[in-house]
Image (cartoon, rainbow, N blue to C red):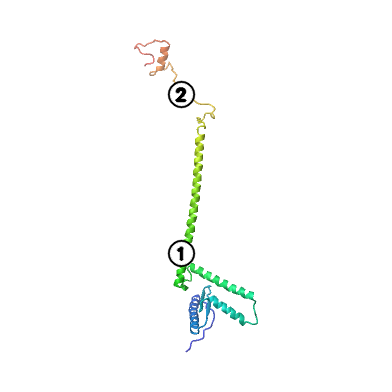
Amino acid sequence: MGRGRVELKRIENKINRQVTFAKRRNGLLKKAYELSVLCDAEVALIVFSNRGRLFEFCSSSSMMKTLERYQKCSYSASESVTPSKETQNSYQEYLKLKLRVEHLQRSQRNLLGEDLEQLTTKELQELEHQLEMSLRQIRSTKTQLMLDQLCDLKRKEQMLQEANRAFRKKLQEDGPEIPLQLSWPGGGGGSSTRQPQSEEFFQPLPCDPSLQIGFSPLCIDQQLNTGSSTHTANGFFPGWM
């Protein structure tokens, strides 16, 4: 029993759609290669996936040459519509820019680590070399920036040291001219001076002749000065008990 006819429509399942795309893409690229080898034909194949990934095959040395040949053939075949030379140049420039943009986009994805399975060993080595050069440039720029910041900090440090020396010299010059003023707290705003604490606290106590408790040398001095020679029966002065 033969295989039934498959209805051609979009595959809804995402996984099945990706698997089918990969299988049929590889088969299409294989058929294009076989056609170019067996029939000595110039074949160019360009495939874009739904995510924008580019897959191409060209039997000649350059895809651009094949596209230019296609443009010449297509323009010469159409006799009814003959575009001007300016339009042809503009279109060719558009194709060149488009290919350039696609190449830059593919290079950018490769630098980000995407679509590396399509690259050869030589292309991977060239990509690694480009990454190393980019890292060296980034490190060099970072080192130069840090050196510039260090120079600015040293310059600021020198300025601060010079200002500090100038202030210190000014203080040394103006130091002897500044009078030293000491004021006691509660002295009425500094208008009146207070006696030293020793003179204020150490004052002679007044002598009371009526109190005869203990020995009072002050009372003895006063009695000697007045010429009193009164003695008690025991021969002691009245200041003694």
Q: Residues within 10 Å of mark 2 (few under 14, many from 20)?
A: few
Q: Residue at x 49, y 36 (%)?
A: 172
Q: Position of residue 56 (x, y in %)?
A: 51, 76
Q: Is residue 112 above or below residue 28?
A: above
Q: Nearer the viewer, residue 175 or 81?
A: 81
Q: Which mark is residue 199?
A: 2
Amino acid type at mark 1: Glu
Q: Nearer the viewer, residue 194 or 92?
A: 92
x then y, percent, for residue 118: 47, 73
Residue 179 lies, in percent from the top left, at 51, 31
Q: Which residue is mark 1?
A: 132
Tell me the element at label 2: helix
Q: Earlier in the sequence, mark 2 or mark 1?
A: 1
Q: Quadrant of the C terminus?
A: top left
Residue found at the very far bottom of the displayed protein: 1
- Residue 129 x %, y %: 46, 66
> The residue tagged with tag 1: helix, strand or loop?
helix
What residue sits 51% from the left and 69% below the top? 107
Q: CA distance from mark 2 to mark 1?
A: 89 Å
Q: Quadrant of residue 73?
A: bottom right
Residue located at (50% from left, 44% from top): 160
Q: Nearer the viewer, residue 132 or 230?
A: 132
Name the residue type under label 2. Glu
Residue drawn 49% across the image and 51% down it = 151
